[in-house]
Amino acid sequence: MFDRKKQPPIKSLIAQGCQIDGNFSFAEGLRVDGELRGNITGTADRPSILVISETALVKGEVLADHIIVNGQVQGPVHARRMLELQPKARITGDVTYKMLEMHQGALVDGRLCPIVDNVQGQVEEKPTLKLAANNS
């Protein structure tokens, strides 16, 4: 869809010290440094990038093409393409993504659900991976 050189520009900012109560929709790029209590949605008609910085707190559902998290999210996260979890990322909720980059120190308290394209080009979730521990 887009690489690092062709990412959409970040045109909107929720600055540190600001708090928004309610849902927030954006086109192209958004950076969150403050607090948002509501859902964040990047429009589907063109590529979107969302940056949730180290100082940010989002309480609600997050949806965009490319999501970079280094702050706190309390709610589900849906990355249509790429999800980057930086070292200070703290997510409480299920995470859905097509590609995932997770740095050491990032925490997810929820399910990791990769998205795959099937033969007909439709999107479906892969089954959850279950790990068994040897308690002997």
Image (cartoon, helix red, strand yellow):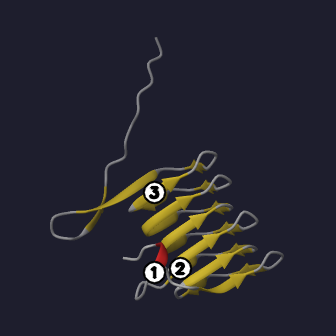
- Give x and y (percent) for residue 131: 41, 33
Residue toward you, 102 or 115: 102
Label 2 SS: strand
Which badge, 3 or 1, comes first in the chain's sequence?
1
The part of the image, by quadrant, that contains residue 18 is bottom right
The part of the image, by quadrant, that contains residue 34 is bottom right
Label 1 SS: helix
Amino acid on which disc 3 is placed: Leu
- Are discs 2 and 1 less than 8 Å apart at CB? no
Label 3 SS: strand
Numbered mark located on residue 70 in the image: none
Numbered mark located on residue 100 in the image: 3
- Give x and y (percent) for residue 85: 57, 57
The part of the image, by quadrant, that contains residue 36 is bottom right
Q: Nearer the viewer, mark 2 or mark 1?
A: 1
View extreme (top): residue? 136
85 on left or right of 57 = left
Which badge, 3 or 2, comes first in the chain's sequence?
2
Quarter of the image that includes the N terminus: bottom left
Q: CA distance from mark 3 to mark 1?
A: 19 Å
Q: CA distance from mark 3 to mark 2?
A: 19 Å
Numbered mark located on residue 6 in the image: 1
- Give x and y (percent) for residue 76: 54, 62
- Are discs 3 and 2 less than 8 Å apart at CB? no
Name the residue located 45 percent from the left edge and 81 percent from the top edge: 6
Circle 2 is placed at which residue position?
Answer: 41
Amino acid on which disc 2 is placed: Thr
Name the residue located 46 percent from the left edge and 51 percent from the top edge: 112
- Are discs 3 and 1 less than 8 Å apart at CB? no
Amino acid on which disc 1 is placed: Lys
Q: Is residue 121 above or below residue 43?
A: above
